[in-house]
Image (cartoon, rainbow, N blue to C red):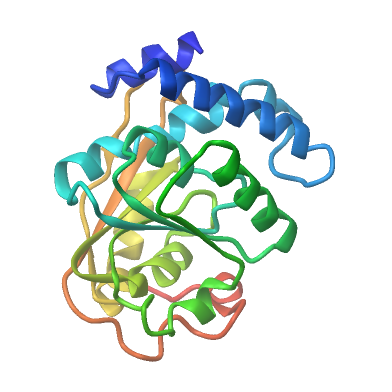
Amino acid sequence: MEALRAGARMLGLELSAVQERQFHRYREGLNEWNERVNLTSRAALADVERVHFLDSLSVAPVLLREAPETARVIDVGAGGGFPGVPIKLLLPAIRLTLVEATGKKADFLRWLVSALGLKDVCVVAQRAEELAHQPGYRESFDAATARALGSLPTVLELTLPFCEAGGIVVMPRAGDITAEVDQASGVAEALGGRLRPPVQVGIAGLRGDMALVVADKVAHTEARYPRRSGVPARKPLAP
């Protein structure tokens, strides 16, 4: 766990002994379940502290700085629990909802929540496009996050409808982020959001082009968004 400890310190975070044990159990669970549920690649699993845990924790300082301690946070397309569960381990007071449409992955997440002894975590096995139109979920969260969910326009359409006005979406991204943000700024505005300039993460062990993209929720999202299941990924909104 040394890479994880060192990276967390660079983010201004210190892992307790309890949190280190939880991350260790998390890693064991991924190894156990990945044999029957495709949660991550073998290469990523071999370097999980850096590839998944530390990458996920890059979101935590933004939430610490800009969201309430007991913020309602939703992780859309949670998969193996990234980035939501590592964030929850560092910020145990948040109330976390993990959205994962694939049943077997949702089963893993339920097991993980129990194995790590997490409180105030809800796993919802449903498409985000459907869930975002339901009362109690639509515009009900202080913050949303998503990782490896698709293009930036797709991610924005699947996350911004969950955030209340004044909330934020925090997205770890890699690659030519500045160009991507410039191209997606109009999409964010159409969904009631406003994109900030990307911020490089700059943590030893992570890719040099890793950055955080933050969208502020500044207005209500029109009722027609998100569009029906599968459409945001197949036909991303145009700038």
The residue under the point 45% across, 69% down is: 158
Picture quadrant of residue 65: top left
Q: Position of residue 27 (x, y in %)?
A: 62, 27
The residue under the point 45% across, 62% down is: 155
Relative side of 217 to 97, left or right: left
Q: Position of residue 67 (x, y in %)?
A: 19, 51
Examine the rendering and report whether any part of residue 204 can be seen.
no
Location of residue 149 with respect to 238 vertically, above or below: above
The residue under the point 41% across, 31% down is: 209
Location of residue 90 with respect to 213 vertically, above or below: above
Examine the rendering and report whether any part of residue 82 can be seen.
yes
Q: Nearer the viewer, residue 108 or 235?
A: 108
Location of residue 14 with respect to 57 vertically, above or below: above
Total count of labels: 0
Looking at the rendered image, the quarter that the C terminus falls into is bottom left
Q: Position of residue 133 (x, y in %)?
A: 43, 84
Q: Nearer the viewer, residue 228 or 15?
A: 15
Q: Position of residue 111 (x, y in %)?
A: 65, 46
Residue at the bottom extreme, as displayed: 224
Picture quadrant of residue 181: bottom left
Residue at the right extreme, as displayed: 36
Location of residue 1 with respect to 121 vertically, above or below: above
The residue under the point 35% across, 78% down is: 138
